[in-house]
Image (tube, helix red, strand yellow):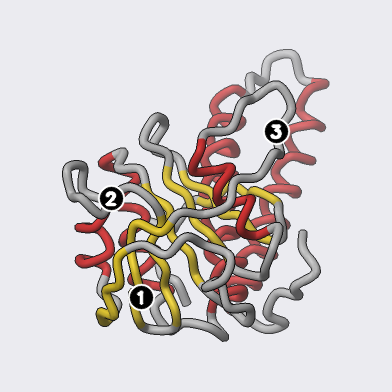
Amino acid sequence: MTETSPCDFSPLKEALRSSLQEILQDLKTHAASLDNEHCCMLSELADIRERFIRLQSQASSFYLNCYLAPYTEKYEELSFCIRHLMERRHGALIIIERKDSVNSLIHQGVPLGARFTFSLLESIFYVGNPLHDGAVLVRGSEIVSAANILPLSNYEAGPKKLGTRHRAAIGLTELCDALVIVVSEETGSSSFAMGGRLYPFMPLSENEPVH
């Protein structure tokens, strides 16, 4: 996926492995049932589709937890906030600084220097908040600043034209090792950029364990 290696040991990794093996076994079973013309597998395929969606959510949490754990203790609060923003279709752009400083790469906005809480982060992106345009910078357990402007990438994902937030997320991560999370206000979907590439991100629901 990227040059960064994910965690070697994690309950989420084992959950992913188990889910994949179960789905593969069920797919083999359903493939064999094609010879039985009296067997309709549409309901089973719908169930597998839902399991793949849950699997993508587990995989998102696994990779982000691995990529962010060495740099911030606020993964769970961040994931909780992202899900709320998605549900409300509030657009968001969040930089999580890792080894490389981003100070010289962004047009710095409004300094905050506030302790990270999901409620504060979420409130910044409420429509009408004067700080909601631009990106929030998270460093460790601190929300450093808001309304930061990022360099835009020229990258286009095939025929699909990327919005400004997505191009900004890719643009910054082409220049440093930061991870940038994007929430689309048009679709309510979220993704994260890392190493100049964009990946879909589906945070776990509130009743699913992160660890």
Residue at 51% across / 38% down in the picture? 164
41 relative to 139 in the view: left or right: right
Residue with the mark numbered 2 = 132
Amino acid carrying label 2: it is His
Q: How many marks?
A: 3
Label 1 crowd (10 A; few <14 / some 14-19 / many >=20): some
In the picture, the disc for residue 37 is none
Rendering coords of residue 137 (x, y %): 42, 68
Q: Give the quadrant of residue 6.
A: bottom right
61 relative to 134 in the view: left or right: right
Which numbered disc flags the more N-terminal residue, 3 or 2? 2
Label 2 crowd (10 A; few <14 / some 14-19 / many >=20): many
Residue at 67% across / 54% down in the picture? 22
Amino acid carrying label 3: it is Ala
Under circle 2, the secondary element is loop
Residue with the mark numbered 1 = 144
Residue at 20% across / 66% down in the picture? 119
Front-most of residues 159 and 24: 159
Label 3 crowd (10 A; few <14 / some 14-19 / many >=20): few
Rendering coords of residue 9 (x, y %): 67, 83
Gap in angstroms between the C-alphas marked 3 and 2: 26 Å
Question: Looking at the figure, which quarter contains the N terminus?
Answer: bottom right
